[in-house]
Amino acid sequence: MVPYSEAKRLITAAVFEHDTIVYVKGREKQTWLWNLLLLHTPKIGRAKGVPSRTFARFFPSPPPKKEEEVRYWECPVENTMEHRAVRLLSRRYNLTSTGYKYLEIGINVGPPSYVEIALGDNRGHELWLSLETWKGLYEQRWNIYKMLCNEYKDNFISVGPLTVRVCTMNDATLVRLDSSSVRITMTETTLRRMFAFDGCIDVTFERLVRLVDTVDVKYTRFSNIASEDAIRNSSSFNGHQLVDCELLALVFNTHEKNPDVVICE
């Protein structure tokens, strides 16, 4: 039998990483799971003088009675991004086995266009990072690991526009990245996996930054052409170039304007 504390820790980790599906069959087990989560008031934040908050904030209503076969719990995110950025030639690296959290790099279409790094989840929340901020975060990784072990001098680390904190919930230790408008929370395992892609980010950034001017030139030329068909038939369009094809599909698609679509290699 799984110990009570371990069950709460696993459920909490599943909430933030979406790597685990909590199977609940029958109302009796649903009620047990709900009571398990609400039984105690967990502490969110460092143990030193951080006020506790009720778990009901994260689970504002009990599971619906009709969904008895499978239920996975979602933690509401405080800042919802209404529109995802359109990125060309993007690379996305999954940080969890389900792809719930990811690290992505691509050209954000302007003009002016620029290479953008994004840390996000599959509900549309993203922290947008410059290369400088990403590098600053990477260089602070050992201090973040120390903070996870309560061995760092402070209870937060500032990296450009980001603030990094460690919080605990139901014995699960989490890393929280805050900007002025978005918050991303992850486990230590996810954090370490994210930093493992630093070399990939370097190589991809160097490749993409050389194409930024080309994207701006193509964008300007396509903007001056009336229709999608005219763009495709013009001398400015090269169907063998990925920049041209993605610009046409993502930015100048007159049949279906969908800024939330992101093409990944």
Image (spheres, rainbow, N blue to C red):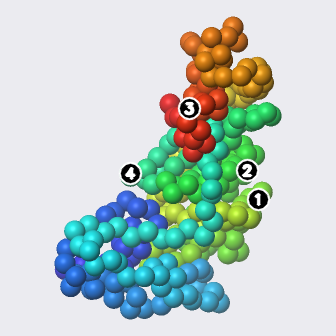
Between discs 1 and 3, the one toward the N terminus: 1
Q: Residue at x 60, y 70 (%)?
A: 78
- In the picture, residue 185 is in which quadrant? bottom right
Using the image, determine if residue 265 lies above or below residue 54. above
Q: Is residue 175 visible?
A: no
- In the picture, residue 36 is in which quadrant? bottom left
Q: Residue at x 44, y 62 (%)?
A: 17
Please indicate whether residue 94 sits to the left or right of residue 213 in the image.
Answer: left
Categorize mark 1 by other alpha carbons within 10 Å: few (<14), some (14-19), many (20+): few
Instruction: Report the residue marked by disc 3.
Output: 255
Labelled disc at residue 74: none
Q: Amino acid at mark 2?
A: Thr
Q: Is residue 121 visible?
A: yes
Q: If the image is split into quadrants, where does the N terminus sit?
A: bottom left
Mark 2–mark 1 Cα distance, whole angstroms, equals 8 Å
Q: Amino acid at mark 3?
A: His
Q: Amino acid at mark 1?
A: Pro
Disc 2 to disc 1: CB gap under 8 Å? yes
Between discs 3 and 4, the one toward the N terminus: 4
Near-viewer residue (75 or 48): 75
Near-viewer residue (28 or 21): 28
Labelled disc at residue 97: 4
Disc 4 to disc 1: CB gap under 8 Å? no
Mark 2–mark 3 Cα distance, whole angstroms, equals 37 Å
Label 1 secondary element: loop
Near-viewer residue (265 or 225): 225
Q: Nearer the viewer, mark 3 or mark 4?
A: 3
Labelled disc at residue 133: 2
Between discs 2 and 4, the one toward the N terminus: 4
Categorize mark 3 by other alpha carbons within 10 Å: few (<14), some (14-19), many (20+): few
Labelled disc at residue 161: 1
